[in-house]
Amino acid sequence: MLERARHLPGRKGRARALPAWALRASTGAWPVLQGTAAATLAWMIAKHVALHPEPFFAPIAAMLGLNAPPSERGTNTLRMLLGVFVGIVVSELTLLSLGAGYGRMALATFVASAAAAEALVRALDVSPLLLPPPSAVARAAWTGGDVLWPALAATTRSVLAGLSASALVGVLVAVALSTSRWVERAFYPYAIFFQIVPIVAIAPLLVIWFGYGARAVVAAAFIVSVFPVIANTLSGLRSVDPALRDLFRLYGAGRLARLVKLELPWALPQLLTGLRIAAGLAVIGAIVGEFVGGGGLGVVVLEAMRQQRTDLVFAAIGHASLLGLALFAAVNALARLLLRSWHVSESPS
């Protein structure tokens, strides 16, 4: 790559060589800028901590359980270690699914942004009711583990059920719509209904139809996430190479054989793209469903709002975001497993 970059076309089409020092400067400038920015940020935080140490060390002591009675310190420390382990697993899954290149860059950006937000919120003395510092959110996540972890488990079950139903129903509907243009024109507008319907408006209806509890939440997650699966799978089924269709017909392949051996494998990349989109939407639908149907992280958010616990609200939102990130990483890992050997989108570079 370096050798190709040395020779660039000039104004009259002749190749002109870039000096070696220019190439080395261009490739090494970005790490230098990153290091300079990180060092500057670290110096600013260190200076602020030196001037105001107590607000920084108190949350850390609380998270480590040092302020708790001796009988509770072991429980707090175990909860902290469990949270760190889960965070490491989720981050590593994300890095593996996204690729080490911009995955680690995104993680480093998140850490730097959290540190900058901590320093900025404390320097401006923003009220914790409006915007709590990241350390307060982390402390709420540790100390509220008895509430957040069961809520996260309930939300995860509802999201997985809704996403699984979306995958199954979405593929079946897409296959049915791909059988005929007339069928597609007659019924595809009704499939669009699942995309344009305001889930907040119909969530009370779901409670009336399915009752309070997990069924209404699963229905909300399904309604929000099914359309991307339908649309992307149908697009993949419609984009099969006509020459390959003719080849299958030439060898006498039936409709089922064409579907299983040609059309579904051809549409698999688009189907997985639809699942990537649906994974995040299923989390959104489940949280909205929990606002009216009860249970899960949605109830934690509502209760924390009533108690004016903004830090706990952010902690619950963070857990929901980690759930969506983990689902996205799982779909990415599945796509890499299924497509790595034959499709260009997942082929190793």
Image: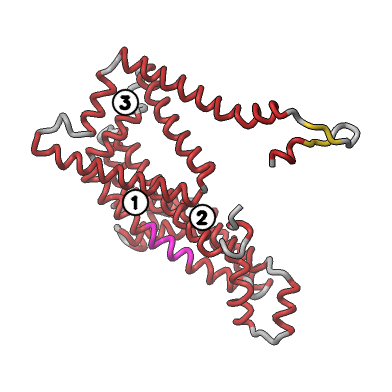
Q: Magenta span has 164? A: yes
Residue at 68% across / 69% down in the picture? 240
In this orientation, which residue lies closer to the viewer: 51 or 341? 341
Quarter-wise, where is residue 24 in the image?
Answer: top right
| Up-down relation of residue 221 to residue 252 (above or below) | above
In this orientation, which residue lies closer to the viewer: 24 or 183? 24
Residue sitting farthest toward the top = 51
The image shows residue 333 at horizontal and vertical percentages of 48, 57
Instruction: From the image, tell me which residue sits under label 3.
Output: 128
Count neighbours of disc 2 (C-alpha within 10 A) and say few if under 14, some if 14 to 19, many if 20 or more: many
Distance from the alpha carbon under mark 1 to that under mark 2 = 22 Å
Which amino acid type is marked by label 3? Pro
| Up-down relation of residue 265 to residue 119 (above or below) | below
In this orientation, which residue lies closer to the viewer: 285 or 160? 160
The image shows residue 273 at horizontal and vertical percentages of 56, 57
Can residue 200 be spotted in the picture?
no
Q: Which mark is residue 63?
A: none
The image shows residue 82 at horizontal and vertical percentages of 26, 46
State yes or no: discs 3 and 2 in contact (Cβ < 8 Å). Answer: no
Q: Which residues are magenta?
A: 159-167
Count neighbours of disc 3 (C-alpha within 10 A) and say few if under 14, some if 14 to 19, many if 20 or more: some
Q: Which mark is residue 290?
A: 1
Residue at 58% across / 68% down in the picture? 174
Counting residues from the start of the chain, the first of labels 1 and 2 encountered is 2
Which amino acid type is marked by label 2? Arg
Quarter-wise, where is residue 70 in the image?
Answer: top left
Which amino acid type is marked by label 1? Glu
Give the foreground label among 1 and 3: 3
Instruction: From the image, tell me which residue sits under label 2.
Output: 276
Which image quarter holds the N terminus? Answer: top right
Distance from the alpha carbon under mark 1 to that under mark 3 = 26 Å
